[in-house]
Amino acid sequence: MTDEAPLRRRDTPEPERDGRPPADSPDPTSGGPEPVPLTAPREGTPRPVETDDELAEVVARMAAGSGPVAVDAERASGYRYTQRAYLVQLRRAGAGTALIDPLPLDDLRTLDAALAESEWVLHAASQDLACLAELSLKPRRLFDTELAARLAGFERVGLAALTEQLLGYSLEKHHSAADWSTRPLPESWLTYAALDVELLTDLRDHLAAELDRQGKTAWAAEEFAALVASADRPPRVRPDPWRRTSGIHRVRGARAQSRVRALWYARDGVAARRDSAPGRVLPDSAIVAAAEADPKDERTLLGIAGFGGRSVRRLARVWLDALDEARALPDDSLPINQPVEGPPPPHRWAERDPIAAARLTRCRAVVVATAESHNLPPENLISPDFVRRLAWSPPDEVSPQTVGDTLRGFGARNWQITLLADQLADVLPAPATT
């Protein structure tokens, strides 16, 4: 229990509930009472912190608060080139809610220090940890409500769905894809952002109790520790990122692929300079169409779908120069298919290695059955990639120990190995024929 003020609701809450539904609120999807729309934070919508003095006041409040701290961040995915945070939201018992605009502030190290000993509560933490780390905010302990819900076997694990099911409140999510780099931020957006952390610690408590009831608290602790360990790890750089252009499978031949590559990097340079999402500079579909058509003059280029917009037309010389460069490449500089690390796609296993394909089928059956018996998704029981790698190249001597060591080398957690190593060791060898 906290001493926080009651939630502001459209109806009048019963005093003894302190503005919240009882802990055993029924699932509204199963015929129970309709969820109550949550339209405003308890203390109203705070103004964003924009100065060092305002930040110091928030730091003092958060340090004086108690219990876990709810944390969220808003990015401008689909609008900006980077994945930086444009707003940080926090809420803690005894401290209330704070919204922080990181743009005018030098850094948030003082806030990080104030929260160093606290458990941070995030929803889908892996989406926000990198942008928080850029601001010098890194949890030492965390609780991920989305991951907890997955481990507990919930089918719907979005924040709004869980808040309705467990707490009896509905959250509006219509600003989730907004351009959070907008300044000033509209009042309705700020309210939305504040509500994202309003009930996060309440949700944490319900999920922690459910994990404990199912005997999965230790599993969740391992998963959360792994998230903390990766919080400030730089993202893995993908080789040949241009190969992920949507629709590239239609582009035939190395020469045409070189045009995709040239246009992709030309677009990326423009996007980086403008701090704009690459797709807003030039859509993937336009890159693929131009790679197929190989236009050699501006009139032909601008006749291709995707090149007709004013901002794209202004860059016509950039696109034509890129195509000219690709056209001038010698044959030995054209793209070549790089060897793929790890096993091939599963649909090719039967042709490449039927024995391995049979191993994979047996291993997948073990994973699915074990996941069902423990009420959690198979992909959260073990990474599908780990299963494929194990089935493609099992240890020379198969035993629970060698299987466990192999999975641990891939990055599997101890609880996953405990549940699966013995069974996978049993099915990796081909069944004896009679």
Image (tube, grey):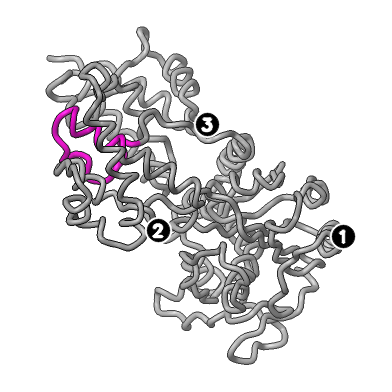
Q: Is residue 212 magenta?
A: no
Q: Which residue is drawn at the image coordinates 61% and 69% (left, top)? A: 183
Q: Residue 186's x, y, as percent?
A: 59, 76
Q: Is residue 259 magenta?
A: yes
Residue type (three-letter) at the residue carrying disc 2: Glu
Please state, as top left, top right, bottom left or bottom right, where the C terminus lies in the image: top left
Q: Is residue 34 or residue 158 the one in the foreground?
A: 158
- On the picture, is 100 further left or further right than 58? left
Q: Residue 340's x, y, as percent?
A: 30, 22
- On the picture, is 417 further left or further right than 344? right
Q: What crowding class fits label 1: few (fewer than 14 Cα within 10 Å), some (14-19), or many (20 or more)?
A: some
Q: From mark 1 to mark 2, how far is it between C-alphas?
A: 39 Å
Q: Which residue matches tag 1?
A: 60
Frontmost of labels 1 and 2 is 1
Q: From mark 1 to mark 3, how far is it between C-alphas?
A: 37 Å
Q: Total number of numbered labels?
A: 3
* First in residue order: circle 2 vs circle 3: 2
Q: Which residue matches tag 2?
A: 155
- On the picture, is 336 further left or further right than 373? left
Question: Magenta span covers which residues?
Answer: 242-262
In contact (CB < 8 Å): disc 1 and disc 3: no
Residue type (three-letter) at the residue carrying disc 1: Ala
Q: Residue furthest top?
A: 396
Q: What crowding class fits label 3: few (fewer than 14 Cα within 10 Å), some (14-19), or many (20 or more)?
A: some
Q: Examine the rendered structure and indicate whether residue 167 appears above or below residue 290.
A: below
Q: Examine the rendered structure and indicate whether residue 328 appears above or below residue 2.
A: above
